[in-house]
Amino acid sequence: MVTRMKILIVEDDIEAAAYLAKAFREAGIVSDHASDGESGLFMASENAYDVLVVDRMLPRRDGLSLITELRRRGIHTPVLILSALGQVDDRVTGLRAGGDDYLPKPYAFSELLARVEVLGRRKGMPDQDMVYRVGDLELDRLSHSVRRQGKEIPLQPREFRLLEYLMKNAGQVVTRTMLLENVWDYHFDPQTNVIDVHVSRLRSKIEKDFDPPLLRTVRGAGYMIKDDRTADA
């Protein structure tokens, strides 16, 4: 478990914020609280936090506007959006606004904690690339968009994270365990077919009507994304 992590909770429901602060404190995580979007923006801009936990529906400034303004100011603290708006379109909108993760309400605190810990680890990673490219495939982390040969390819949030991790490790074999720990954030039964299903869907989206194939299965090892035509692949 990550200890001494410091987070900011931006939540207008005082009881919900108090519950989160107490639960995080018991998990060894220090937290501050902002009860509206303007206060959250000020505190996130003036203080160093490992992770921001932001509700979408806030007084004075909504959560998405808060995140967008932080990114405009060059503040890239990882943000987990916590919201009762949990439909696919809501999650996509939140991620495209600059959120790093999205957890619909109601939620289990154990899952929220795991996601916050993962985002806290990401903050310390040296990787600062905003755009990944493999051949003619391009993934923009800032706008959460994917294009191949200039054509935009819509992906679900999990498919985007899967492709992002594969492209970050382009040319290297990525094991199932690596994907479970870095894309799903927690451990599944290693025999589950959830990875196979998502890889199959992702492959069909980024390779349909395009050549050459980029995403390959390495039998007995895992997966790799690579373009043999490029010298640096």
Image (spheres, helix red, strand yellow):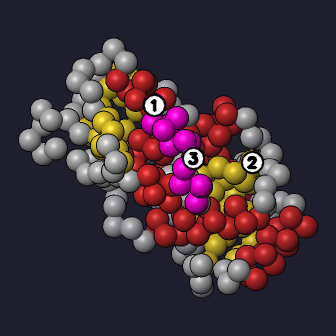
Label 2 SS: strand
Question: Is 69 placed left or right of 148 in the picture?
Answer: right
The answer to which of marks 2 and 3 sits earlier in the sequence is 2
The span picked out in magenta is 187-200
Q: Residue 230 falls in which quadrant of the image?
A: top left
Question: Is 172 placed left or right of 158 in the picture?
Answer: left
**Distance between the alpha carbons at the discs numbered 2 and 1:** 26 Å
**Distance between the alpha carbons at the discs numbered 1 and 3:** 14 Å
Q: Is residue 78 above or below residue 93?
A: below
The residue tagged 1 is 200
The answer to which of marks 2 and 1 sits earlier in the sequence is 2
Query: Residue 24, how many percent across, how many down?
Result: 73, 76
Proximity of marks 2 and 3: CB atoms separated by less than 8 Å: no
- Front position among marks 2 and 1: 1
**Is 198 in the magenta?**
yes
The residue tagged 2 is 104
Three-letter code for the amino acid on which mark 2 is drawn? Pro
The numbered dot on residue 113 is: none
Three-letter code for the amino acid on which mark 1 is drawn? Ser
Q: Which of the image's four quarters has the C terminus?
A: top left
Can you see residue 177?
yes
Residue shown at 85% from the left, 73% from the top: 18
Label 1 CA crowd tier, 10 Å (few <14, some 14–19, many 20+): few
The residue tagged 3 is 192
Q: Residue furthest left?
A: 231
